[in-house]
């Protein structure tokens, strides 16, 4: 990842910004639509909309944030998806990705391996919920986002890992005809990422299928992406086709490319600089000025137990 000096590319006219209250009003409106159909004054009868009845999902109130949500218009247009190019502005190109049908392979050291369609998977897991998380990119920008999806540990219950499964490896699709970035041979495609099985069991580890009360748009990683809010954003792999349970630690795409810059752990830590820039502050999408970055991105209480005894190693080896 090149250091991206954040220009105010997201500066929008006031009327394009979606403040939280508008989001909530629209959410209620969508819910009513989803619940059946309704009459609007001055309009004709609106029948049940085409989008899936899963959206917008119930809010899980354990995971809410006091600060305003980032504007949806920025979160869905200022994106990192190197399969479609290295600029932030790839959202139109990403629309080429066909996300239906979409099957996911879950294999490796499990008692119950499977190849399953994303819609069947959601059904099997009992649906989806909404959680608002902070998200911090290694490039020092951040956002606050309402994700829809399910906890990753539900997948573990489904496939039943064997005793020697210690890591999860995630893999994105590979199709250079659709994703022109994958024609660039110096990247070790497909995009891969990995975490420990203990991290996967953590309550915060989430697989997202939606955002802002709707299905994920392609550019944000449809139809299924990882969200690990206490880690730098590159760990949150998009458009997953395969999850493998392994005994050995997997090596992610960025770690393969630049192991001194992008390590395995990648926990947000303002005290450990990236070799080329400080991580002490961050720029929030759509908001002027910088704010201090917080250890584990503010989720210390939920995740610090995972790294007890490892702190010194993590400090010594950058944020690896
Ligand atoms: N997943 C894939 N497959 N390809 C990518 O290029 N970029 C990562 C991560 N997941 C990336 C990916 C990085 S660097 C970040 S910061 C987040 O996605 C950005 O998520 P967003 O674009 O939805 O904000």
Image (tube, rainbow, N blue to C red):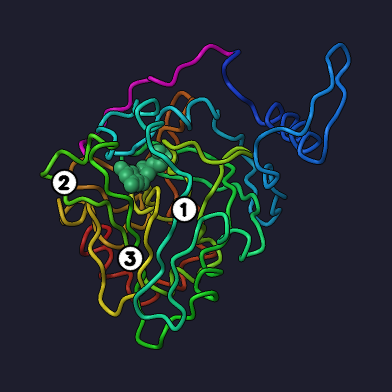
Q: Residue furthest front?
A: 101
Closer to the camera in the image, 216 or 227:
216
Q: Please say whether residue 256 is visible from this viewpoint.
A: yes
Ligand 1's quadrant is top left
Q: Earlier in the sequence, mark 1 or mark 2?
A: 2
Q: Is residue 279 visible?
A: no
Q: Which disc number belongs to residue 182?
A: none
Residue 165 screen position, x and y as percent: 36, 81
User: Residue at point 25% right, 32% down?
Assistant: 85
- Element under label 2? loop
Which residue was labeled with disc 3? 169
222 on left or right of 53: left
Up-down: is 245 above or below 116?
below
How many C-alpha atoms fall within 10 Å of the one at disc 3: few (<14), some, or many (≥20)? Answer: many
Residue 210 figure quarter: top right
Q: Mark 2 highlights which residue? A: 187
Specify the farthest residue to the left.
Answer: 186
- The range drawn in magenta is 1-14
As measured in the structure, the alpha-carbon distance from the residue carrying label 1 to the one carrying label 3 is: 14 Å
Which mark is first along the chain, 3 or 2?
3
């Amino acid at each position: 990842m090149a250091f991206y000096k954040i220009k105010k590319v997201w500066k929008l006219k006031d009327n394009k910004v979606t403040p939280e209250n508008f989001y909530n009003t629209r959410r209620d409106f969508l819910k009513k639509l989803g619940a059946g159909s309704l009459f609007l004054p001055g309009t004709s009868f609106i029948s049940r909309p085409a989008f899936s009845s899963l959206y917008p999902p119930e809010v899980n109130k354990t995971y809410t944030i006091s600060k305003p949500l980032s504007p949806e218009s920025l979160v869905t247009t200022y994106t990192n998806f190197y399969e479609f190019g290295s600029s932030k502005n790839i959202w139109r190109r990403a629309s080429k990705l066909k996300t239906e049908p979409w099957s996911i392979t879950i294999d490796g050291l499990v008692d119950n391996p499977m190849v399953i369609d994303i819609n069947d998977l959601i059904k099997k897991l009992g649906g989806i919920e909404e959680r608002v998380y902070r998200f911090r990119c290694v490039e020092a920008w951040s956002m606050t986002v309402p994700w829809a999806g399910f906890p990753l540990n539900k997948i573990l219950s489904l496939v039943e890992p064997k005793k020697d499964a210690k890591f999860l490896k995630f893999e994105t699709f590979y199709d250079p005809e659709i994703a022109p970035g994958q024609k660039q041979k110096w990247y070790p495609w497909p995009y891969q990422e990995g975490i420990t099985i203990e991290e996967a069991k953590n309550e915060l580890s989430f697989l997202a299928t939606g955002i802002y009360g709707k299905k994920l748009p392609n550019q944000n990683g449809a139809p299924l992406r990882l969200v690990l809010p206490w880690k730098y954003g590159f760990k949150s792999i998009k458009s997953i086709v395969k999850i493998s349970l392994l005994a050995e630690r997997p090596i992610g795409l960025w770690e393969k490319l630049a192991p001194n810059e992008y390590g395995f752990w990648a926990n947000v830590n303002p005290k450990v600089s990236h070799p080329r820039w400080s991580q002490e502050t961050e720029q929030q999408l759509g908001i002027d000025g910088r704010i201090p970055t917080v250890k584990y991105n503010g989720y210390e209480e939920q995740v610090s137990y995972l790294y007890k005894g490892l702190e010194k190693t993590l400090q010594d080896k950058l944020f690896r």
